[in-house]
Amino acid sequence: MEKKITTAIDAFYNSNNCAQSVIKAYVEDLGIDEQQALNMALGFGGGMGKMQKACGAVTGAYMVIGLRNSKFINDFERRDEITAEMIQGFRKKFCERHQTDQCVHLIGCDIRTEAGRQTFKENKLKDKVCSKCIESSVVILENLFKKS
């Protein structure tokens, strides 16, 4: 688990968004092309296209769940059912830790404005909030995968 956390956090501090960072931690396990995975997650940072909706660390985790289950569960109906259950379980655990899964509420400022971006930077929210959400996402994923 620690290796995955380190991989995700390092990715985040090296030009990847929150969704990409979570996915990057799982490319080896999933046997997927890293660049394609990063490209797939590109638009999910900042709460989906910087709209500050669902946290990118959360949507990245959802992508990991879907990719993992598509690889390891052959029965389509069962795969769909298990994936939905895992995503719902993930969201519940994430919200228990962070009170929400919405980017705007997690960071408390509007990054679509200059003032919001300044607040984000001055208050070191990348360190205080975003990196914690990425770490939580990996921990929750690992716990979910242990149970399945």
Image: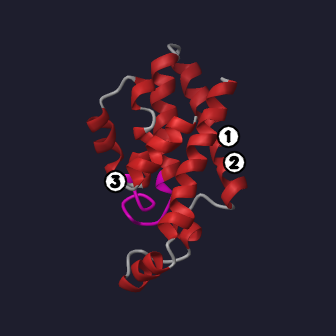
Determine whether, in the image, residue 94 is placed left or right of residue 119: right
Q: Compare marks 3 and 2 and give the one earlier in the sequence.
A: 3
Q: Amino acid at mark 1?
A: Gly
Point 39% across, 48% down: residue: 11
Asked whether the residues under the numbered discs 3 and 1 touch, taking CB atoms below 8 Å apart as contact, a structural biologist would say no
Residue 3: image x %, image y %?
Answer: 51, 36
Determine whether, in the image, residue 39 is placed left or right of residue 85: left
Q: CA distance from mark 2 to mark 1?
A: 5 Å
Q: Is residue 109 visible?
A: yes
* Residue 52 lies in the magenta-colored region: yes
Asked whether the residues under the numbered discs 2 and 1 touch, taking CB atoms below 8 Å apart as contact, a structural biologist would say yes
Q: Secondary structure at mark 3?
A: loop
State whether residue 75 is above or below residue 148.
above
Residue designated by label 1:
89
* Quadrant location, the N terminus: top right
Q: Amino acid at mark 2?
A: Lys
Point 69% across, 61% down: residue: 99
Residue that extends furthest to the right in the rendered view of this protein: 96
Which sits in the foreground, 110 or 126?
Answer: 126
State whether residue 99 is above or below residue 115.
above
Which region is colored magenta? 44-56
Residue designated by label 3:
14
Which sits in the foreground, 81 or 18?
Answer: 18
Residue 91: image x %, image y %?
Answer: 63, 47
Q: Amino acid at mark 3?
A: Asn
Q: Secondary structure at mark 2?
A: helix
